[in-house]
Image (tube, rainbow, N blue to C red):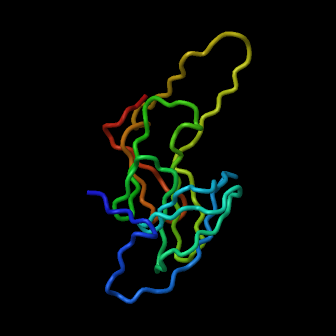
Amino acid sequence: MAAPIYTAQSRMPTTVEEKAPVKVLATLENGREWKSGDEVVINNIKYTVVEGGKSTTTIENVTAADYYYAAYDFGKGNIENTYLNVEVPAIQGPAITMIQPMVASNRNTNLVFKNLLGTLRLAVEGSGTITRVVLSSLDRAIAGQGSANMDFAGAPMLELAGDGSRS
């Protein structure tokens, strides 16, 4: 069962003395920019981005912790402990309409979000109409249910279930 994701406003206080809230500096890799109103989950609490238009933004009033793990743009996915679970559809449309999940983790409040999926761009010359492009793998799933540990070092990895689609 998925762990509850609280909003910063609805979080229930704990019986343990809490530290003062902190500011988190959140950066999206590869020039991607935050939009005002974007939602990001940090340590299972949902926060809303106030200032967009840049690849780095400050998220205020984040619950202080010894370690931070976060997820962004994961659509209908869910979070269980430190794992982000998402569905990668076998039939893709334009990248602008798809989820583009990113995760981040750090011991301090500087979070750099890293992509879990790549983008395939095709440059086609000449005339004619392309109606379909099929990608396939001989031994690994390239679509289906997947999970990524947000508590990572180096580069995160989205692992797709073995019964996922291979094309």
Question: Against 35, is 82 above or below?
Answer: below
Residue found at x 42% / y 59%:
149
Q: Is residue 79 left or right of residue 130?
A: left
> Residue at point 33% right, 63% down?
4
> Which residue shows up at 60% across the image and 35% down it?
120
The part of the image, by quadrant, that contains residue 164 is top left
Residue found at the far top of this picture: 128
Q: Quadrant of residue 114?
A: bottom right
Toward the front, the furthest residue is: 9
Is the C terminus in the top left, top right, bottom left or bottom right quadrant?
A: top left
Task: Please identify the quadrant where the N terminus is shown.
Answer: bottom left
Pick the residue in front: 73 or 163.
73
**Relative to residue 161, is residue 81 depicted above or below?**
below
Q: Is residue 122 left or right of residue 80?
A: right
Q: Is residue 47 above or below residue 84?
A: below
Q: Position of residue 102 (x, y in %)?
A: 53, 54
Count the numbered circles shown.
Answer: 0
Task: Tell me residue 134's x, y (percent).
Answer: 50, 23
Residue drawn at x 58%, y 56% as measured from the top left: 37
Closer to us: 48 or 81: 48
The residue positioned farthest toward the right in the image shown: 126
x and y, in percent, of residue 65 in the image: 46, 79
Q: Position of residue 150 (x, y in %)?
A: 45, 62
Residue at the extreme left of the image, as rendered: 1
